[in-house]
């Protein structure tokens, strides 16, 4: 017994083509999104800084989004820090903000909110590591 051909309607053919195009466009878009947001690769100093940050800073500062816990969000700090004080680079601003928190108080936050003892408690290498980590937050 031979099978009889099933007639295809133009509407069915168009629907199949539309689905095929949609699926391919979706897959291309997903690939582009994944390509744009690679997982960061940290240097050993940045890894150390992330660990120090987790121990000393993460109870008050958020890094993954712009929400406020106690102090300002540090999401995008690497970009914002270079624009906060004219003529000052992001590394210098961030370091000074950690060691002398009253020097540059972020608008909307009271002076004295951030502990002033970090300069005494953290070794210079830890401060440099935290700054290196924070400068990865774009």
Image (tube, grey):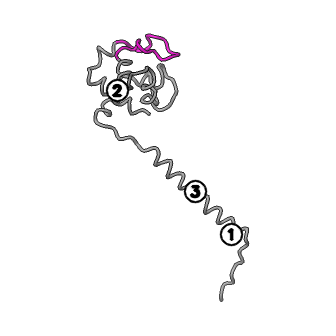
| Residue beneath disc 1 | 13
Where does the C terminus fall, quadrant-wise? Answer: top left
- In front: 11, or 93? 93
| N-terminal-most mark, 1 or 3 | 1
Image point (35%, 25%), residue name? 91
The magenta-colored residue range is 99-116
- In front: 44, or 36? 36
Image point (53%, 55%), residue name? 28
| N-terminal-most mark, 2 or 1 | 1
| Residue beneath disc 2 | 131
Q: Position of residue 95 (x, y in %)?
A: 35, 21
Q: Is residue 1 left or right of residue 116?
A: right
Q: Main secondary structure of the magenta part?
A: loop
Label 3 secondary element: helix
Q: Position of residue 3 (x, y in %)?
A: 66, 84
| Residue beneath disc 3 | 25
Is 122 one of the magenta-colored residues?
A: no
Image point (45%, 25%), residue name? 83
Q: Is residue 101 above or below residue 28?
A: above
Residue closest to the far bottom: 1
Q: Position of residue 9 (x, y in %)?
A: 73, 72
């Amino acid at each position: 017994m031979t099978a009889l051909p099933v007639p295809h309607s133009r509407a069915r053919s168009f629907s199949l083509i539309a689905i095929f195009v949609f699926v391919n466009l979706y897959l291309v878009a997903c690939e582009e999104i994944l390509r744009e947001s690679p997982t960061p690769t940290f240097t050993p100093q940045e890894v150390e800084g992330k660990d120090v940050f987790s121990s000393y800073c993460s109870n008050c500062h958020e890094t993954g989004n712009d929400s406020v816990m106690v102090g300002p969000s540090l999401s995008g700090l690497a970009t914002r820090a270079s624009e906060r004080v004219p003529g000052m680079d992001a590394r210098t601003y961030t370091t000074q903000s950690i060691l002398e928190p009253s020097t540059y108080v972020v608008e909307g936050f009271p002076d004295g909110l951030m502990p002033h003892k970090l300069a005494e408690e953290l070794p210079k290498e830890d401060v440099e590591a935290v700054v290196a980590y924070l400068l990865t937050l774009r």
